Image: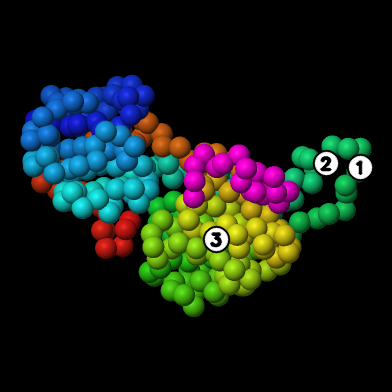
Amino acid sequence: MPNILFAARPERWTLYEPHLREALAEAGLAHAVLTTEADPSEVDYIVYAPNGPVTDFTPYTRLKAVLNLWAGVEDVVGNDTLKAPLARMVDYGLTEGMVEWVTGHTLRHHLGMDAHIHGQDGVWRAGIVPPLARDRTVAILGLGALGSGCAAALAGLGFHVTGWSRTPKQIEGVRTEHGPDGLQDILKSAEIVTLLLPDTPATENTLNADTLSLMPRGAVILNPGRGALIDDDALLAALDSGGIGHATLDTFRIEPLPADHPFWAHPKVTVTPHIASETRVESAARVIVENIRRGEAGQPFLHLVDRTLGY
């Protein structure tokens, strides 16, 4: 039976242990060794968080795979000591949570809900009618599991959904583009843009002064992806000029976002504390155990990271 090292913070062990043991039992791996301490030479799998205790993978000479607890792998993919396969977290609970956050904030801005939520001052603000969803173009940048799920959900609500990715993708009911020219084309018509790209050198500052200027005046940006996808200074300038109407931001270059950062006080920015979609322990445990089961059965691992692309 495999030896599984849980290499994350102690509070995560408390949350994950019962769900991992339950999933292991259901997978016929009840006798697997699941522990937070082990002789590195005897470890077959590492359940891993980048803020956990393992930074050097060299001693783990029997390692079959590293199973990341997080969707993002930017903090581990460049670790030169890691030679074993690396799987990122692609969890149906994570996807569903992200779909709900993106859908909620898209509808918030589509319907102009802030005017009524914040305008409780005795003024009857009638006569402002938003377009129907079919007449609103929304764009998703990044069409992996999270982006594809959000695009499909918004299309299901009737929005005119467009999507962009670095490589060609197809999603029913969604017009997709790829490559630099495709990005420009998507941004020119997008009234609400959601960023769900991975954090790689190729995606840093995807939204910058040039690309922000392509968007319709007053467009809205949602960023539950990664902070580095946006040039902060360029975004602030676009908000001040009115080119961008609002930015709802969930991820940042530095987290927690420093108290003196201009985003906190800007009237056209909503800050949420990296909560767009938390990993759900029960579903994530099943994803991890499925990869362990596959490894023990000699089957290909799911959700492997391409080291050359960084995701």
Q: CA distance from mark 3 to mark 1?
A: 37 Å
State yes or no: residue 291 in magenta.
no
Reading the chain from its start, which is encountered first: label 3 or label 2? 2
Determine whether, in the image, residue 184 is placed left or right of residue 28. right
Residues at circles 2 and 1 in contact by the CB criterion of under 8 Å: yes
Q: Check disc 3: other Cα within 10 Å, few if <14, some if 14-19, many if 20+.
A: some
Residues at circles 3 and 1 in contact by the CB criterion of under 8 Å: no
Residue at left offset 21%, top offset 53%: 80
Element carrying mark 2: loop
> x, y percentage for residue 167?
38, 69
Write down the region rendered in magenta. 253-270
Main SS class of the magenta portion in the image: loop
> x, y percentage for residue 209?
59, 68
Q: Check disc 1: other Cα within 10 Å, few if <14, some if 14-19, many if 20+.
A: few
> x, y percentage for residue 72?
37, 48
- What residue would you read off at disc 1? 123
Compare residues 199 and 142 and report the one nearer the observer.
199
Query: Can residue 251 be seen in the rendering of this structure?
Result: yes
What amino acid type should be assigned to the residue bearing mark 2? Gly
Residue at left offset 87%, top offset 53%: 127
Q: Outermost residue, front direction?
A: 260
Element carrying mark 3: loop
Vertical arrangement, residue 219 with respect to residue 157, above or below: below
What amino acid type should be assigned to the residue bearing mark 1? Val
- In which quadrant is the C terminus drawn? bottom left
- Could you say which quadrant of the image residue 21 lies in? top left
Q: Check disc 2: other Cα within 10 Å, few if <14, some if 14-19, many if 20+.
A: few
What amino acid type should be assigned to the residue bearing mark 3? Asp
Q: Nearer the viewer, mark 3 or mark 2?
A: 3
Q: Which mark is residue 119?
A: 2
- What residue would you read off at disc 3? 231
Q: CA distance from mark 2 to mark 1?
A: 7 Å
